[in-house]
Image (cartoon, helix red, strand yellow):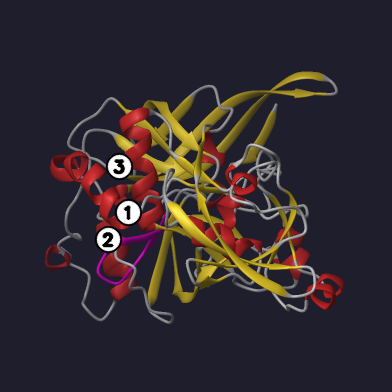
Amino acid sequence: MIRRSRAVFPMLPIMTALLTLALVAAGCSSEGNTQDQSSETRQENVAQGPPDMSSSEVPGEEPVARVADQLRPSVVQINVQSVEETPYGPQRGEGVGSGVIYRQDGYIITNNHVVQGSGNVEVGFASGDTASAEVVGGDPFTDIAVVKVDRGDLPAASFRTEHNLDVGQLAVAIGSPQGFDSTVTAGVVSGLGREVPANLTGGTQEASLVDLVQTDAAISPGSSGGALVDRSGRIIGINVAYLPPAQTGAESIGFAIPSQTAVQTADQLISTGQASNAYLGVRLSDVNQETAEQFDTQAGALVEQAPQGEPASQAGIRQGDIITAVDGREVENTGDLLSALRRYQPGDTVEITLVRNGGNETTVNVTLGERSQ
């Protein structure tokens, strides 16, 4: 039997190169359209406000303990079973991850890599109860998935969907690292708009590992899909990755998917079973020193391929172009481009700023396509 934690990077065995012929900005619509699309879904079943801290018996001078006291019932353990093909034949595998109760009627948010390819899924609640769950849908491009249990009146968490986090503010992580359920760690929001570099994920920028919240709250294998929470008890992120000190020399660097991305993707998965992904239709790499000298630019995303018939090529983008901005928003690397495109939905038209051989700058308008899963 194979047993593994369905855990944060680098334990992502199924998150391989997601960028092939398409550059994906998955699961995120523009703010106004998304609110219209999902407000009815959230009207009755999703917690609209943070937990009532006044009911806690934990002293007010213990903010981490108060947050943990209120939020632990909303964080679950995800146990999965699957059959994996090995050189020695099929082997049964087991894994452990985490999840956050999203709706009172049984919907739970977790990471896609926690449940992708799984057979049986079981949810363990903070009360000690367990329940079988079904996978409603998953989106590899944001690494968000939704599972559902046949239960009602669950303690749904409140998600903070405003783009107003502050670097340095309190951040509390709750999850099941290595199967230790309801584990609480604390730190601060260390950075915003972060990405896990391509050189740490096999050479290609993972679409799901951009535009992340960085934290120094300890995140470990098994924490995937768990909660990153602010001082008031609202979810600010879904934990997804960390940099292992043994491999990188980095200490206390963890990442979470922003709560607004999680909510937008989850609403689509619950509604249709899949997320709508806008894409540009190119293969990219970061600008290196040789390219920078050739094109007289120090930053950007180099177009390695622009296949015919894709949105980019139809707009005039071609191999060798360097993308430096999207609607005036500066692009320094591939991750920046992926992050920028998450603001749009399929069918939106965006202005792409390009630098071509010799340093000539031009702009083109691209109508983004929709990539199915």
Asked if the magenta segment contains residue 235, the reply would be yes
For mark 2, give the secondary structure.
helix
Residue at the far top: name it.
Answer: 89
Q: Residue 213: x, y in percent?
A: 48, 66
Residue 261 visible in the snapshot: yes
On screen, residue 136 above or below 64: above
Residue at 25% of width from left, 69% of height from top? Answer: 232
Q: Do the residues bearing badges 1 and 2 touch, measured as CB atoms within 8 Å?
A: yes
For mark 1, give the secondary structure.
helix
Quarter in which the N terminus is drawn: top right
Q: Do the residues bearing badges 3 and 2 touch, measured as CB atoms within 8 Å?
A: no
For label 1, the crowd category at 10 Å Cα-Cα, with few meaning under 14, some 14 to 19 and many 20 or more, is many
Q: Which residue is mark 1?
A: 72
Q: Quadrant of residue 95?
A: top right
- Tell me which label, 3 or 1, sits earlier in the chain: 1
Residue at 29% of width from left, 44% of height from top? Answer: 102
The mark found on residue 250 in the picture is none
Q: Do the residues bearing badges 3 and 1 touch, measured as CB atoms within 8 Å?
A: no
The mark found on residue 127 in the picture is 3
Q: Quadrant of residue 247?
A: bottom right
Disc 2 residue type (three-letter): Asp
On screen, residue 56 above or below 276: below
For mark 3, give the secondary structure.
loop
Disc 3 residue type (three-letter): Ser
Q: Nearer the viewer, residue 220 or 205?
A: 205
Asked if the magenta segment contains residue 244, the reply would be no
Residue at 33% of width from left, 33% of height from top? Answer: 270
Q: Which residue is mark 2?
A: 69
Residue 144 visible in the snapshot: no
For label 2, the crowd category at 10 Å Cα-Cα, with few meaning under 14, some 14 to 19 and many 20 or more, is some
Q: Which residues are magenta?
A: 227-237
- Tell me which label, 3 or 2, sits earlier in the chain: 2
